[in-house]
Image: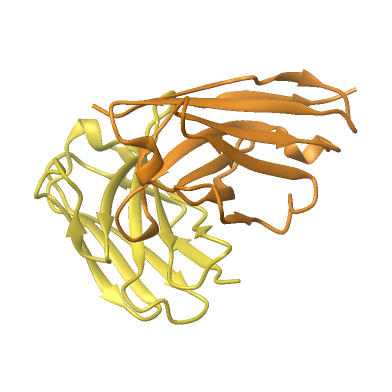
Chain colours: A yellow, B orange
Amino acid sequence: EVVLTQSPATLSVSPGERAILSCRASQSVSTSLAWYQHKPGQAPRLLIYGSSTRATGIPARFSGSGSGTEFTLTISSLQSEDSAVYYCQQYHNWPPLTFGGGTEVEIK
Amino acid sequence: EVHLVESGGGLVQPGGSLRLSCAASEFTFSNYAMSWVRQAPGKGLEWVSAISGSGATTYYADSVRGRFAISRDNSKNTLFLQMNSLRVEDTAVYSCAKVGTLVTHDYWGQGTLVTVSS
């Protein structure tokens, strides 16, 4: 099973600043990695797939990068509505599909 | 817009059973694989099970294999999760999700709460 480790657990960022979230895989997943945004009481939202491709309707301030075992989600200019928990998910070696433990992004 | 609505959650005793449903609309249901994903209180997302568009192939997490069964009725655009031998640790919000590009989940329902407690 591929274990995904996200860091930091919590990130506090001021509006307009950059947020950088990390996801590390226990073995290579090539570029088979997705990122989701999850707000309380709402359904999760797919942000990125294929490590770096934005899903339909996702603002350009969200970008993904990485391959192998190291991945990054960058929010270039944080907006108040970006407060959420962000999860990575791998689909290179499954079943099982696996998610990281999440990074909570707080607005300062 | 794709719409997914789960139902069937509730309170059940350990060892009991529940059947969850997910009603899908606004897309060609039979063309897409579907997943169940759960979130225990205060925890992260955990994939539970997936099924191919035809229903011929199913996949399970080790934690539920042999106890849960995923199925679908393409004539009614509905996904199911039969949960047997429930344990306290199965307590979670269960969401169905459409599998889109490259085994990612591009649309999700709001979820239904399953509580396993005596």
Q: Is residue A49 visible?
A: yes
- Which residue: 23% across, 31% down? A81
Q: Is residue B42 above or below residue A64?
A: above
Nearer to me, B38 or A83: B38
Is residue B65 shown left or right of residue B98?
A: right
Instruction: Return the x and y of residue B69 as percentages of the image width and height.
Output: 70, 43
Residue at figure coordinates x 52%, y 77% from the top left: A26
Quadrant the C terminus of chain A occupies:
top left
| Outermost residue to the left | A60
Left-right relation of A89 to A61: right
**Relative to A27, does residue B70 appear above or below in the rendering?**
above
Along the line of sight, which residue is nearer the eye, B72 or B36? Answer: B72
Q: In the drawing, does residue B110 fall left or right of residue A106? A: right
The tally of labels here is 0
Q: Position of residue B55 (x, y in %)?
A: 54, 47
**Quarter of the image where the N terminus of chain A is located:** bottom right
Which percent across, then down, holds residue B66? 80, 51
Position above or below: A46 against A29: above
Q: Residue at x 9, y 50 (%)?
A: A60
Question: Does residue B110 appear in this view?
Answer: no
User: Residue B12: horizontal and vertical position, in percent?
Assistant: 81, 22
Image quarter of residue B97:
top left
Q: Image point 34% across, 58% down: which residue?
A: A34
Q: Is residue A21 above or below residue B43?
A: below
Left or right of residue B18, residue B110 in this image: left
